[in-house]
Structures are given as structure tokens and as C-alpha cells.
Amino acid sequence: MTSAPVIEPLPDLPAMEEFGKRIAARLQPGDVVALSGGLGAGKTTLARSIIAALGHAGEVPSPTFTIIETYEHLRVPLVHADFYRLEDPSEAEEIGLDDYREGAALIAEWPDHAGGFAHEAACLEITLETVGEGRRAVVAAGEAWQGRMP
């Protein structure tokens, strides 16, 4: 069961980074952070904020072309996936997504292209929307996120 959506205003980059830190502080292996929104909505920016807050120093490449980037050295091992280029959800299985996820958290950009993750209790759904010069996040939490909303 997913919680009622919560609106998180993200008027600027520091607000986005702070939101990423709050997510990272609560992230556990098995969790999914499903990031939706149009092109340029800030999905990769939020993913980079989460990854940096988990302890990654250095560049965080967008996985648009590689589809999957792994970060095993973080406080929580992490898989960062961008499913934009998938043409069918079955392709997520073909690239071995379940194997990558073993013991790790997943940040999924364009989750609908991989069939979605909202059915998973450990899914935190975040839809980023442009509002003026800033953004807002519409956040819905699966059952496993109840009591630890960012």
C-alpha cells in the first residue's frame, strides 16, 4: 500500500541537494527510489545528490547510455539505472537488473520504461515537476518507507 502523496518544494539546487541527503540518510538495501518526470525535470540531479550523500566523491555519470551504473563502496551499495532507452519492460530482465539489485538499493530514472516499481513495498516514488524556476517533488511511499519518509 502506497502512502498519500506529499509535496516537497525544491525551489533551487541547495533544496534539491538537501532532499537528496534526507533520502540517502534513510536508504536501505532493497529500497527503490523511482524518479519520474519530464526531460530536464531534475531526476539525474537528485540521483547525484543521493549518491554524493551516501559517500561517493567524484563525478556521477548519467547512466543514459550505459543504462546501469553500480556503486558498491557506499554506505548502502547502490545501482543507478536510467531506463529511458528501454523499448520494452522485458529488457530490464534481459540486462540482469535483479542480479544488480541483490543487496543494493536502486535509483531508477524513467521507472515506467522498466515496468515500474510502485508495487514493491520498498519503493519511494518521486515525480519531479517544474514550477517556475524551481521544481517540486510529489512523493509517495511504499509500506517499507512508512515512518522514514525523507
Image (cartoon, rainbow, N blue to C red):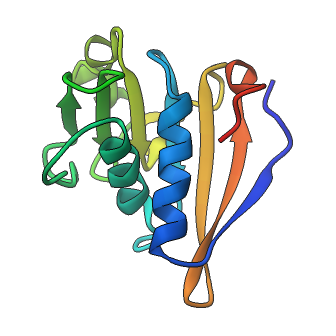
Question: Which of the two residues, 147 or 112, is positioned nearer the viewer here?
Answer: 147
- At x 27%, y 11%, the residue is 99
Q: Position of residue 44 (x, y in %)?
A: 35, 58
Most distant residue in the right direction: 4
Question: Which of the two residues, 22 or 31, is positioned nearer the viewer here?
Answer: 22
- At x 19%, y 37%, the residue is 69
Location of residue 76 with respect to 114 vertically, above or below: above
- At x 50%, y 28%, the residue is 27
Q: Position of residue 9 (x, y in %)?
A: 69, 68
Residue 19 placement: quadrant: bottom right
Location of residue 73 with respect to 114 vertically, above or below: above
Q: Is residue 32 left or right of residue 5?
A: left
Question: Which of the two residues, 43 or 110, is positioned nearer the viewer here?
Answer: 43
- Residue 87 visible to the viewer: no
Q: Is residue 85 left or right of residue 148?
A: left
Tell me the quadrant of the picture where the N terminus can be found: top right
Q: How many marks?
A: 0
- Residue 98 visible to the viewer: yes
- At x 19%, y 51%, the residue is 60
Q: Is residue 26 left or right of residue 81?
A: right
Q: Position of residue 134 (x, y in %)?
A: 57, 81
